[in-house]
Amino acid sequence: MTKRKIYLLSPKELSQEVIAVTFAKTSRSPLTFREIADELSDESSAEFHEKWVVGYGHASVAEHAVLHIAIEDISRLAIECIESNRLASYTEKSTRYQKWDAGAFVTPPELDGHPLRDEYQKTVEMLFQSYADSLVATRALIMESNPRRENESDDAWDRRIRSRYVDACRFLLPAASFANVGMTANARVLESAIRKMLSHPLEEIRQIGEEIKSAAQGEVPTLLKYADPVPYLVETGKKLSSHSQPISEQAGDQNFYCKLIDHDPAAETKILAAVLYRFGEMSFAQALETIEKKSDFERARLAEELLGGLSRYDVPLRELEYSHYTFDLVMDQGAYFEFKRHRMMTQTPQALTVNLGYVTPSLITEAGFGTRYAAAMDAVVEAYKKIAAFNPDVAAYLVPNGFNRRVLASFNLREAYHFCQLRAAKNAHFSIRSVARKVYSEIATIHPLLATYMSLPEDETWQDHFTTF
Ligand SMILES: Cc1cc2nc3c(=O)[nH]c(=O)nc-3n(C[C@H](O)[C@H](O)[C@H](O)COP(=O)(O)OP(=O)(O)OC[C@H]3O[C@@H](n4cnc5c(N)ncnc54)[C@H](O)[C@@H]3O)c2cc1C
């Protein structure tokens, strides 16, 4: 009997394109991976990719070439475009644990030589100054209620309490604020990400697309060769935006912020039937019939067997995916920035504007900073309107995290478990906690049998941390 062999094809020894071809060739070659790799060169790998990946559309081969891209000092609008690719991995500089220096922002190239450039810069500088002053005001309040511990240094004390005040001040930071992101992606998803960037209405994002393409081509010259703008993406956005209607709904009640607009009323039955199907030999129709005939007590016992044994680190069985919920959500931009990271959802955000108003965190008001905060937000609205008249995409750079954003999101119960438990947890930002609680409460109302096993902290309501919303 031949011995099992498991080993790495290391990027320290082989280029990413050679690794991808080595794996691709196992499809037709009797040789071992090591032998295939030994026969390849960068040139022969490039020829293979030209023929199979580009020529014959065997694009999945490019998934075996993986890149780690460091991207610094870009706007948060650019981050949104980059992170809209669900099959890649990201880590960003946190607005919760770090502070932003004055001047750490993007001025969009569209404003070069434009009469509104000055007003743009003054507005963003005013926001950064308000942010810096709000840090001082809220920090003092948090220090009062969390005194220094014995022998605690200034740094250690600040680290312990930082997120409590930074969490409230980040609402003032505009989308222009610099962000850093580390992205890990395979060449297939990277090609799609670059195409999207090159087709974006904002010049900054098109430039970033070109720069990422040229940096990544150092590693995968053939696989990204044809990452070009996509006329379909450019033209379709232009055509469809002309159909948009003005906003008529008003902020104020929970229904405005979280509307469950679609779900499958039979989802619990389907999930339980899928579980019987998985562990038995019935057809799905038989499994459904079996569950439909069960008493409430028997269904509850099945639900307990399915979900009662979950520990904090476990993921529920995949059969929870036989369900769907579509939510129309309104959340502040800071919360959206975290929400968008959930890749197992289908998300459709609307453009970032000032049209849905802004929220005020309670700590800002309690620290006596409410009037400054409101004045800063009102000044943004004025400047936004002027710049939006020239170019609404460019005006979005001005919009701070406190303004509301509308997003349509569709996901299944398995992802709802992950999202609600992770984002309603005590260590999550209070904004996203409130989104997670609202989503949980809607799902628990319609599907109590299976939602009851989600583990969320008890003692919080969704209005707890805001004075205006
Ligand atoms: C307390 C806290 C602090 C955070 N701080 C930061 C921070 O400083 N910077 C930052 O950038 N982000 C931060 N995040 C965001 C975090 O890194 C995740 O991006 C975010 O919570 C989305 O969750 P997710 O990736 O688990 O799940 P989703 O994208 O919603 O996916 C659901 C599940 O699918 C699986 N999955 C999805 N994609 C992959 C994949 N590519 N590979 C393997 N499994 C996958 C995982 O099991 C995952 O849990 C923080 C989150 C928390 C809760």
Image (tube, rainbow, N blue to C red):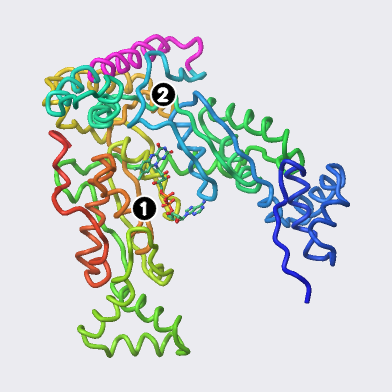
For the N terminus, the quadrant is bottom right
Residue at 43% in and 19% down: 105
Range of the magenta residues? 111-134
Is residue 40 depicted above or below 217 in this figure? below
Residue at 72% in and 37% down: 219
Is residue 322 depicted above or below 144 in this figure? below
Q: In the visual, does 444 lie left or right of 411? A: left
The amino acid at mark 2 is Ala
Ranked by sequence position, the earlier of labels 2 and 1 is 2
Q: Which mark is residue 354?
A: none
Give the SS element for disc 1: strand
- Dominant secondary structure of the residues highlighted in magenta in the image: helix
Labels in figure, total: 2
Q: Which mark is residue 409?
A: 1
Q: Is residue 126 in view? A: yes
When asked about the image quadrant of residue 16, the answer is: top right
The amino acid at mark 1 is Ala
Q: In the visual, does 304 lie left or right of 344? A: left
- Residue bearing the label numbered 2: 176
In reply to whether residue 265 is colored magenta, the answer given is no
Q: Position of residue 295 (x, y in %)?
A: 22, 87
Q: Position of residue 182 (x, y in %)?
A: 53, 35
For the C terminus, the quadrant is top left
Q: In the visual, does 209 lie left or right of 133? A: right
Q: Is mark 1 within 8 Å of ligand 1?
A: no
Label 2: few (<14), some (14–19) or many (≥20) C-alpha neighbours in 10 Å: many
Label 1: few (<14), some (14–19) or many (≥20) C-alpha neighbours in 10 Å: some
Give the SS element for disc 2: loop
